[in-house]
Amino acid sequence: MIKLVNVNKSFGNLHVLKDVNLEVAEGEKLVIIGPSGSGKSTTVRCMNFLEEPTSGEVYINGTQLTHKNKTEIIRNSTAMVFQQFNLYPHKTVLQNLTLAPIKLQKVPKAEAEELAYKYLDIVGLREKAGVYPSTLSGGQQQRVAIARALCSRAKIILFDEPTSALDPETVQEVLDVMIKLSQENITMVVVTHEMGFARQVADRVIFMDDGRILEEGSPEHFFENPTHDRTKAFLSKILK
Amino acid sequence: MIQQIMEPWRWQSLLAEWPKFASAFVTTLEIAVFALALALALGVVFGLMSTSHNRLIRIIARVYVEFFQNTPLAIQVFFVFYALPYAGVALSQVTIGILCVGTYTGAYMSEAVRAGIGSIPKGQFEAAQSQGFTYIQTMMLIILPQTIKIILPPMVNQMVNLVKNTSIVTMIAGGDLMYRANAFATNGTMSYGPSYLLCGFLYFLLCFPLTTWARRYEDRLKKRDIQTAEQLEKVEEGLA
């Protein structure tokens, strides 16, 4: 479904990703953890070419992403949920959800709206369809962003620290939606610090440090006996 | 001078010429409307070009802006009117007015557009890209609509300047409003005062509605923001 082969990424002199190899299976829930600056966000951003690797290859459903084909491939296969939500402030909630389906997937307006309401129901925000995003709390905005991702009908959803910018009391409402989502046959790649979520949802956890994948395994492996000292140190800090 | 302005016969002879003034007014209006269309088109295109990732495209936009901002409009008009015919390009005064005033104002407008685009958070571009919007779609559907609030005041300033700057074609006998006023005043009667007063009034008629509309529109946008803020407060109260 997603495959990274020897992916390297540098920003100027900063070598952020170092030979990252990773495969994500269809329907898999993959959680990426690691200290800040370890390259975990850059890794997911390489998966939809928001960052184009300096070297190496990225495959989505067997097709290699290139600068030329990325827009087309991304449009049909992946969606992303951002730390800062990135809803379109000049559009209502409903318009945020229907814009891409109408303009890109050429879905008729009525059908796109029907789909939008369906996903607003799933995230519990049907009554907010007509308001502008700036009137919503952070947690609500993120739930709308998740609904927007679902409206693309993409089989892969990438989450880049979806709860890091939220007030503590709204984190759970977003996690609940993501947990609900995890029961669907959607491939989820989630960068997060929420270990409870990882334990509950992840099929596999990856620990990144200094631009490399240092350790990977089941959530149980990580929480019960991580191999590397670096992983242990990180987890002990974050689990406290 | 006041005495001259007060003399009724001067006004009578001026009003007797009103068909000529009306047709000159239409000429000015014609130059202004087409120049405005040209300036807006150039402003958007070069504004977009100046935010491009491609260095060459950015340089082209820069050269355009610097060239037209740093040379007098009068020279541009004279060059096209007096010099270009030697290269086999002879254009009518009205066409020259449209082209020169349009390209000149377009340079300023492109700077406003560039600043507007620069003020939109990077996350908006990334959200659009992650949904699979092409560059043009991203700009037209998501970025430019958000810049309107920011670029409206400088844009309207430029529009008003454009209308007033159309009077430059007087220098090449353009048959515009200013030219007509001048012709009347110097045609034996020496009625400078009444002629220029009427002329100024007619320019005012063109510009004043524009600035008034812009101020109202800006107020309305501001009010919408206040409403948004009030709604947000209610939401926060609800949470508390």
Image (cartoon, coloured by chain):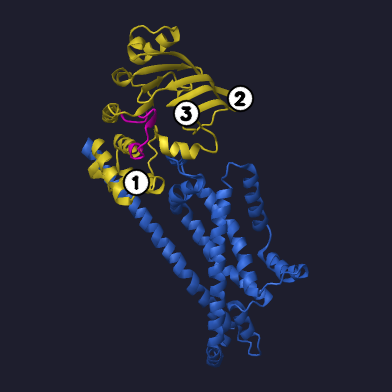
Chain colours: A yellow, B blue
Q: Name the residue at the bottom extreme.
A: B9
- Calculate the distance from the C-alpha at mark 2 to the C-alpha at mark 3: 31 Å
Image location of residue A240, percent across then percent down? 33, 13
- Calculate the distance from the C-alpha at mark 3 to the C-alpha at mark 1: 28 Å
Q: Judge whether B25 appears above or below B101 on screen.
A: below
Residue designated by label 3:
A62
Q: Please state if A194 lies on the left or on the right of B195 as rendered.
A: left
Q: Judge whether B37 appears above or below B56 on screen.
A: below
Q: Say which of marks 3 and 1 sits in front.
A: 3
| Disc 1 element | helix
The structure residue drawn at horizontal position 56% and vertical position 89%, both measured from the top left corner, is B17
Q: Say which of marks 2 and 1 sits in front.
A: 1
Residue designated by label 2:
A13
Instruction: Evaluate whether residue B157 shows in this view.
Output: yes
| Disc 2 element | loop
Q: Please state if B234 lies on the left or on the right of A89 as rendered.
A: left
Q: Is residue A159 magenta?
A: yes
Residue designated by label 1:
A98
